[in-house]
Image (tube, helix red, strand yellow):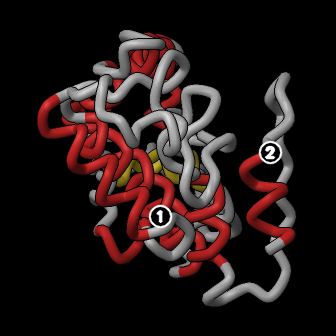
Amino acid sequence: MEEPEESEDSGQSLVPVYIYSPEYVSMCDSLAKIPKRASMVHSLIEAYALHKQMRVVKPKVASMEEMATFHTDAYLQHLQKVSQEGDDDHPDSIEYGLGYDCPATEGIFDYAAAVGGATITAAQCLIDGMSKVAINWSGGWHHAKKDEASGFCYLNDAVLGILRLRRKFERILYVDLDLHHGDGNVYSSAQ
């Protein structure tokens, strides 16, 4: 973990936390619909030396139990099953939203667990008072529903982060800056 360069007011404010590891970026780069995006983002962060202004924290991988705080066991088990073989033709895959937007590729469960874990790590940094800002640039997958992948989103890491934050904070403000409606998050708060 790199420590940010000290500033004169280091006792007055906390630097942002950047959730990063080379392994995490490599895992995120494997997503077929957006190959190498995580590497491009991290390269820009390094090129502008932004990582020197942040505390770098290595993400953990979400456990099945952590992912099940929002997603159904049946969905997670199916995602894990098709992930082992990259089985896009499994008869139940359509029911779980796996197909064109969200192909059931080999390793997709590990990818989802990595992204979910990174967002949970960011939320935990906020809970622990490590910073007032925590960033997972490869997260924000807001279309996945409890039992369905949707819109390139296999796991709703935004909801997982919110659920983790609710362990300490009663009220959470979620601001979605995507072009598309974050329908998975709306449905989660309505239930």
- Amino acid residing under circle 2: Asp
Closer to the eye: label 1 or 2: 2
Q: Which of 189 and 55 is in front in this view?
A: 189
Q: In which quarter of the image is residue 24?
A: top left
Of the residues under marks 1 and 2, which one precedes in the sequence?
Answer: 1
Q: In this view of the protein, can residue 10 be seen by the observer?
A: yes
Given residues 55 and 75, the one toward you in this image is: 75
Separation of residues labelled 1 and 2 (CA atoms): 20 Å
Q: Crowdedness of circle 2 by 10 Å Cα count: few (<14), some, many (20+)?
A: some
Residue pictured at 37% horizontal, 14% vertical: 32
Q: Mark 1: which secondary structure? A: helix
Where residue 137 sits: x, y (%)?
A: 54, 35
Q: Is residue 82 left or right of residue 183?
A: left
User: Residue at point 41% right, 46% down?
Assistant: 115
Snapshot quadrant of residue 171 = bottom right
Residue designated by label 1: 120
Q: Is residue 3 above or below residue 90?
A: below
Q: What's the mark number on residue 83?
A: none
Task: Bin the neighbour count of mark 1 within 10 Å (Cα to Cα): few under 14, some 14-19, many 20 and up.
Answer: many
Residue 76: % across, % down: 37, 58
Which residue sits at x=56%, y=69%? 70
- Picture disc at residue 183: 2
Q: Residue at x 85, y 49 (%)?
A: 175
The C terminus, quarter of image:
bottom right
Give left or right: position of 60 versus 188: left
Residue 174 locus on image (x, y percent):
82, 57
The amino acid on which the numbered mark 1 sits, given as a three-letter code, is: Ile
Q: In this view, does 6 lie above or below 121?
A: above
